[in-house]
């Protein structure tokens, strides 16, 4: 498909594209709010609850260190969750749009 022959304004104004964009934006906004809140729990917890973060779990390992390491796990979990949702839902909607507009260009 030649991108120069595709009418991008028609793609953007298509209600299915707008629905896809709205759905994806709201999903990403939720993930962003969750990830930022989780990220800031570490410095807030260290500043306001140092006695909790200093509780030893095993040897020199304490709650604060475990919470800091959990941020990596949460980041990977968010990435995995997003990729599953994108593969199952968003990509299917985008593929349907692409096929329809590809047919219009080739006609």
Image: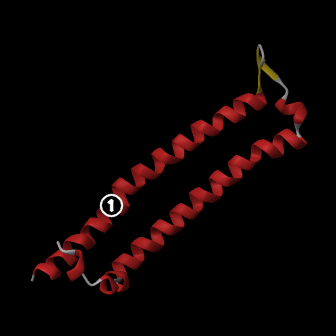
Q: Is residue 41 left or right of residue 106?
A: right
Residue hosting label 1 = 91
Q: Using a 10 Å C-alpha cutoff, classify the residue at mark 1 as few (fewer than 14 neighbours), some (14 to 19) or many (20 or more).
A: some
Q: Is residue 24 left or right of residue 2?
A: right
Q: Give coordinates of residue 97: x percent, y percent.
A: 27, 73
Q: Quadrant of residue 3?
A: bottom left
* Number of numbered discs overlaid on the protein picture: 1
Single out the residue that lies furthest toward the front: 4
Name the residue nearer the viewer: 6 or 12. 6
Q: Residue at x 66, y 32 (%)?
A: 69
Does residue 81 lie above or below 57 as drawn? below
Q: Give coordinates of residue 89: x percent, y percent.
A: 36, 60
Q: Quadrant of residue 104?
A: bottom left
Which image quadrant: the N terminus?
bottom left
Q: Residue at x 76, y 46 (%)?
A: 41
Q: Give coordinates of residue 83: x percent, y percent.
A: 41, 50
Which image quadrant: the C terminus?
bottom left
Colour basis: secondary structure
């Amino acid at each position: 498909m030649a991108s120069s022959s595709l009418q991008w304004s028609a793609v953007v104004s298509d209600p299915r594209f707008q629905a896809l964009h709205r759905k994806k934006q709201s999903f990403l906004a939720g993930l962003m709010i969750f990830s930022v809140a989780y990220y800031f729990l570490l410095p807030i917890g260290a500043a306001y609850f140092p006695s909790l973060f200093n509780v030893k779990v095993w040897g020199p390992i304490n709650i604060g260190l475990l919470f800091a390491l959990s941020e990596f796990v949460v980041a990977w979990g968010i990435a995995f969750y997003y990729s599953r949702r994108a593969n199952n839902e968003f990509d299917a909607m985008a593929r349907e749009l692409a096929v329809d507009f590809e047919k219009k260009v080739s006609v």
